[in-house]
């Protein structure tokens, strides 16, 4: 499941645009008064200015990067003072899921991001959005509703599950479960996602403000 497009909400449009283009060095592909898009390898990541009446958005996502690009990226994040430590006081870990280096960070909006290193066959620096967090009311029910998309993974617990394959995954978490490596609970906010996985259709997750298409 390749994640092709993601649309998220933000209250800090200009700050995020600077962060993702200057610090993570994603190419800017669209730049308007209320929206901007960057290219994360095979994925287009878009942030749209949120209405002030809505609750503050908060997401989790992970970006795949080539092994050669990981250390310079980590140093840029560390220089910004936005890297996050695990319970052992470490910033750089080895991902139990993907087996390469990983580092977590907090962007200017407070989103919890992650950079994952992969052995890449091409010369590309950034590969794709590898993970997108989907907080849900019920993990098992959400997995059933996503069944039009194949998955290689089985549910790990009542509150957590990967859904997808080696190209990309949704991280299904029960609402209010803390996002690793913090104690911040997952909350549900609008997002639009387009994936490359079989014939096109719209996938409905009732009672969630998510639009998922393929």
Image: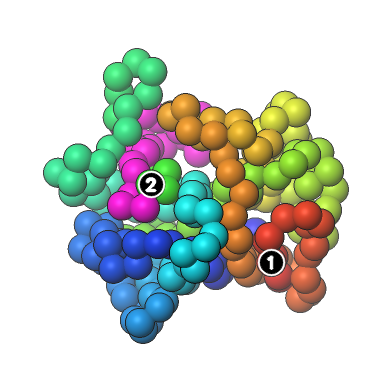
Q: Position of residue 69 (x, y in %)?
A: 27, 52
Question: Residue 28: percent from the left, percent from the top?
Answer: 31, 75
Give the side of residue 103 with respect to residue 200, left or right.
left
User: For mark 1, does the 10 Å Cα neighbourhood hold few (<14), some (14 to 19), or many (20 or more) residues?
Assistant: some
**Span of residues in magenta:** 92-109
Closer mark to the observer between disc 2 and disc 1: 2
Q: Quick check: can you spot residue 65? A: yes
Q: Nearer the viewer, residue 169 or 181?
A: 181
In whole angstroms, how far apart are the C-alphas of marks 2 and 1?
22 Å
Callout 2: helix, strand or loop?
A: loop
Residue 63 horizontal side relative to residue 84, left or right: right
**Mark closest to the chain's N terminus, 2 or 1:** 2
Question: Residue 2 versus residue 174: which sits nearer the camera?
Answer: 174
Residue drawn where x is 36% and y is 83% of the image: 32
The residue lying furthest to the left in this view is 79
- SS under mark 1: strand
Query: On the image, which quarter does residue 71 sit in?
Result: top left
Q: Is residue 103 magenta?
A: yes
**Residue in the picture at 38% in, 47% down:** 110
Report the quarter where the N terminus lies: bottom right
Q: Which residue: 22% across, 57% down?
A: 23
Do the numbered discs 2 and 1 sit on residues whose CB atoms are within 8 Å?
no
Is residue 52 located in the magenta-colored stretch of the structure? no
Image quadrant containing the C terminus: bottom right
Q: Quadrant of residue 157?
A: top right
Q: Which residue is mark 1?
A: 211
Residue 62 picture location, percent across and down:
46, 49
Q: Which residue is mark 2?
A: 110
- Compared to residue 23, the image places residue 106 above or below, namely above
């Amino acid at each position: 499941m390749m994640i092709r497009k993601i649309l998220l909400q933000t209250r800090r449009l200009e700050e995020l645009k600077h962060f993702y283009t200057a610090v993570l060095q994603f190419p800017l592909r669209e730049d308007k008064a209320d929206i901007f898009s960057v290219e994360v390898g095979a994925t287009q990541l878009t942030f749209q200015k949120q209405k002030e009446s809505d609750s503050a958005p908060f997401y989790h996502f992970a970006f795949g990067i080539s092994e050669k690009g990981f250390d310079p990226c980590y140093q840029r994040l560390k220089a910004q003072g936005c890297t996050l430590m695990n319970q052992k006081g470490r910033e750089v870990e080895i991902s139990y899921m993907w087996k390469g280096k990983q580092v977590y960070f907090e962007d200017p909006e407070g989103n919890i991001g992650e950079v994952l290193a992969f052995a890449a066959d091409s010369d590309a620096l950034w590969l794709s959005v590898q993970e997108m967090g989907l907080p849900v009311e019920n993990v098992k029910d959400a997995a059933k509703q996503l069944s039009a998309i194949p998955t290689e993974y089985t549910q790990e617990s009542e509150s957590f599950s990967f859904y997808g394959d080696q190209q990309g995954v949704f991280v299904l978490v029960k609402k209010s479960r803390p996002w690793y490596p913090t104690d911040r609970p997952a909350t549900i906010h609008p997002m639009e996602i387009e994936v490359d996985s079989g014939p096109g259709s719209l996938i409905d997750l009732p009672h969630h403000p998510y639009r998922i298409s393929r």
